[in-house]
Amino acid sequence: MQPWETLAEADAPDGARLELRRRGHEYLIRAGGWDLMSSRDDSSARALATIGCAGLTSRAGVRVLIGGLGMGYSLAAACELLGPDAQIEVAELVPAIVEWNQGPIAALAGRPLDDPRVRVHHGDVATRIEQVRDHFDAILLDVDNGPDPLAHDHNARLYGAAGLRAAHLALRSSGVHAVWSYSSAGSFARTLERAGFEASVHPVPNHGRDRGSTHAIWLGRRRAPKRR
């Protein structure tokens, strides 16, 4: 079997060592010695955008926030779906991930960072969400393994009550909060409901490294305010 080649290394803000590796046509990003994402996992990453943006394709002036650039697949799918006047913002905490998406892995997803509708927020997506009110039509999160189980405890703020309330406030009326998850297990639907969302879960077959398993997209639709 062909060995893995390390193309680049960097340190994440939490101190974890990141590695960009290649074996043949497959690319892999590892964090702290663990596989984080692979170029073979593109289908479920794209599903985050296709499911989260399904109701926005014909709307004008759409604003979408993507949390976690990964290998660019969710961003690419959003660019393909949304109109020419859409504003697509991607929040990425690790500068090296952005650099790699502009360099050695840029072609994997079709260079979506070059799209003029896209801008990069270099920082924590949770902080970005907390900065705005009634602003985004969709927030798409691909951070960690999803709500449960978490690989990094500091990401819990995104999936707990306070993080979901912040997302609810950041969304426009009937906006959508879509969350990629390693599985559909757990009680995240109830957490979404308590934060004011109508919750649903969408299983997504995985055709990548964990072939045969099923990932999930949790979807929370912001309830319209009740009329008095």
Image: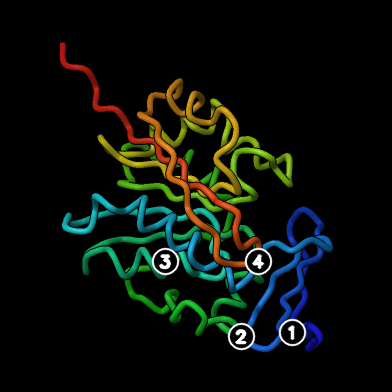
The local secondary structure at tag 1 comes to: strand
Q: Which mark is residue 7?
A: 1
Instruction: Please tell me whether mark 2 or mark 4 is closer to you in this view.
Output: 4
The quarter of the displayed image where residue 105 is located? bottom right
State the separation of the CA atoms marked 2 and 4: 21 Å
The percent position of residue 78, horizontal first and vertical second, equals 36, 63
Instruction: Please tell me whether mark 4 or mark 3 is closer to you in this view.
Output: 4
Q: Nearer the viewer, residue 166 or 191?
A: 191
Q: Residues within 10 Å of mark 4 (few under 14, many from 20)?
A: few
The quarter of the displayed image where residue 160 is located? top right
Does residue 133 appear to the left or right of 8 in the view shown?
A: left
**Residue sitting at the far top:** 228
The percent position of residue 218, horizontal first and vertical second, equals 46, 41
State the separation of the CA atoms marked 1 and 2: 8 Å
Q: Amino acid at mark 2?
A: Pro
Q: Amino acid at mark 4?
A: Arg
Disc 3 designates what residue? 119
Disc 2 designates what residue? 104
The quarter of the displayed image where residue 7 is located? bottom right
Disc 4 designates what residue? 209
State the separation of the CA atoms marked 1 and 3: 26 Å
State the separation of the CA atoms marked 2 and 3: 20 Å
First in residue order: circle 1 vs circle 2: 1
